[in-house]
Image (cartoon, rainbow, N blue to C red):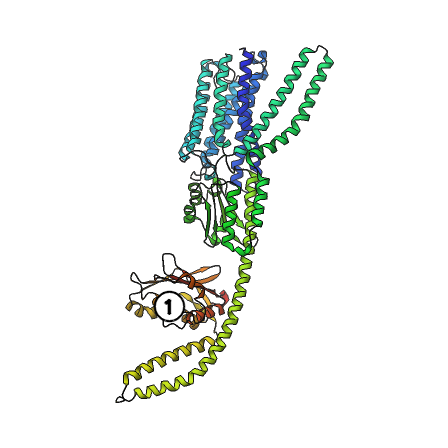
Amino acid sequence: MSDATYFAIAAAMCLVPALVWGILAAEYARFMGFFRSRPVLRRLAVIGFLATTLVTVNLVVAVLRLLLPVGLRTQPNIIRDSLRTLDDTTIMLLLPLFRHGARYASVRSAPPTRAWLVANYGACGVATAVSLLAALGAVPVVAMPAVLVLLGSYVIGMLVLIARSLAQQARPGGWRAGGLGEPRTLDAVMIICGVLGNVVACAVAFRYGRPALPIVVGSASATLTVAALQSASALAFAMPLAVRLPATVLQRLVMTATAIAGTAVLYGGADVLTARVSDTETRRLIDLAAITAIIVTLVPLRAWLGRAIERVLFHRTRQRRAELQEALQGLSPELGRLECCRNAVAAFTRILHLRGAAILLASGETVVHGDLAVEVLEAVWPRGAAMEKLPARMFVSDELRDAPALGEALVTADVFGVVPIRSTRQSWGHLFARTMIFTALPFHVEDVELLESFAAQLARVLDGAALLARAVAVERSLAHAEKLAAIGELAARIAHDLRNPVTAARSLAQQLMGQPSAPFAAEHALILGELERVERRIAGLLRFARREEFDYGPVDLVELVQGTATALAARLVADGIVLSVDAKIGVTVRADREKIRHVLLNLIENAADALHETAGERRIEIAIGRADGMATVLIRDSGAGVPADALPRLFEPFFSLKPTGTGLGLPIARRTVEAHGGRIDARCALGGGMAVDFALPLASEEALPS
């Protein structure tokens, strides 16, 4: 095989990594615009763009040096020397950029300090200056061996530092689309392989007397060996970046390779024809025809090939967007907020071929579909108003550098990206996606926009579900109010008709009890007790039917709860019940103090009654806090709870689970709380027992005593 063939093969070897690095440089240029509003990410994109561009230039220079004619390649001349100087300079410049970028690779790594930056780029400046002086002949011949050793040591040392930094940050396992691009063990292995390849290439170059990582050495076969080692090293260095952009790299690499192959075929055919034609004008015509064929064929072919790759390999964004849109249109607000989220996340996982996806709602609920360790996220992810402080997009680790616990949770759960579910009305929560490398969603600008579009449309569906639920709640409230009014009117009539005869009978029983010698004293006492119980029932009916007047004012809710608990403490201790009050902050509400005290008494007594049949620990816990601009009180017991089918009826008049209950305590409490502009709710507590919580409006600052 001739020397020309060796050099042509070596040039082809260097061209492949040059294409890969050029594609990466183009993607980082896009990221610079994508992260324009986020300084840290834009800085990382700029570093990536500069580094990938320098590597591309270095490899293109290697290709050009290998394709130089023999005379220019072997004899000293300005073209050869300029290409070699450019080759050495790009190597010196890109190493500190790679080391700088490695500091941003993980959420666990601290950003570089100013002293570190000065040392990193200062050493680069010194090495680059020495390299340029040596190239310009400003270094004495006797000092050249020392200079070459110095430059070689700098290059190898920087490569070792880069590999060491990534190895320290690398997490166990191979490549995956999750983990927000965190470095993995396989990344460190590829970097180490790249370093070793460059070391061996440097040793081969020294063996033939052309050090400093040259691409052209004295022997054609040795040149091919050095080119192969450097090409393999360049691909090893590119792999940790390319594997996180598989769709883009593969698509553009196939398109570029097809264009190059097509051009080579057309030019090769033209050369064969021109070799057989002696007429100069005919040769020019053949060359012109070849150029025209390239333009006419390859330009339309490029667009067609791009669409074919997307359709065959990835089924890209347009089809996904249409399917997701159709799935969202099939959601009905009547399903309710949680059911809409369940159907949406199931469709999201199926259409995008994800391993798992989840929605963490601001209200505290979690919806998950597929394989995703959502417990890790639930443990640290903020809910409610705290969600508003999170970044709008979380697809790379630097977006969570200020919140390492969240970044660590996303990495542990292998979450690829997070987007907020937010509308103009409110923030509903966050959508989490876990995908697989190669077979599913790669990181791409259009893919991120697709996820954000899906989350925004889902937020609008949830808005509709919330509005519908609110309308239904208002309708039910009106129906409940009408029902209460009718019941109240009936109760008032019954109580009025019963009160006079009951009062008369009660008076007669008291008179009979007042005569010690009268017979049937025990029977008279029983009659009096039952009549008093009926009197209490009638008083409850009248209170329920009566239109109450409220005396509103600022009330220290913590003091009121603690005072009510103290009043009941003796009775509760006698029954073996432990009562605890958790009030970490002071809360002042606008309320009728006496009416709210009756609500608290009723709820605590209900909790105590529920504990009478409890064999284990008897405990009542009261927690006071704030949520959504309201003061909240939660009363939870450790009893047996209530049946699920009874929960919706607890606040209905005359419905009671207690044998001697009137069924009016909770309805009166609900009416009192709602008259204050608050809300009350009952549910089964986690771990057993019953939990009742109510909320009251906070007092305005003007109403508070000075």
Q: How many marks?
A: 1
Q: For residue 527, what is the image quadrant?
A: bottom left
Q: Nearer the viewer, residue 682 or 120?
A: 682
Image coords of residue 656 (percent x, y) = 40, 69
Q: Which residue is mark 1?
A: 606
In the image, residue 445 above or below residue 426:
above
Q: For residue 635, what is the image quadrant?
A: bottom left
At 35% from the left and 66% from the top, the residue drawn is: 610
Circle 1 — which element? helix
At 34% from the left and 67% from the top, the residue drawn is: 608
Q: Nearer the viewer, residue 290 or 101?
A: 290
Image coords of residue 234 (percent x, y) = 49, 25
In the image, residue 208 above or below residue 613:
above
In the image, residue 80 above or below residue 496:
above
In the image, residue 568 above or below residue 280:
below
Is 522 on the left or on the right of 230, as rendered? left
Is 82 on the left or on the right of 676, as rendered? right
Q: Amino acid at mark 1?
A: Asn
Image coords of residue 132 (percent x, y) = 52, 21
Can residue 706 be seen in this snapshot? no
Q: Nearer the viewer, residue 44 or 595?
A: 595
Q: Residue furthest left?
A: 517
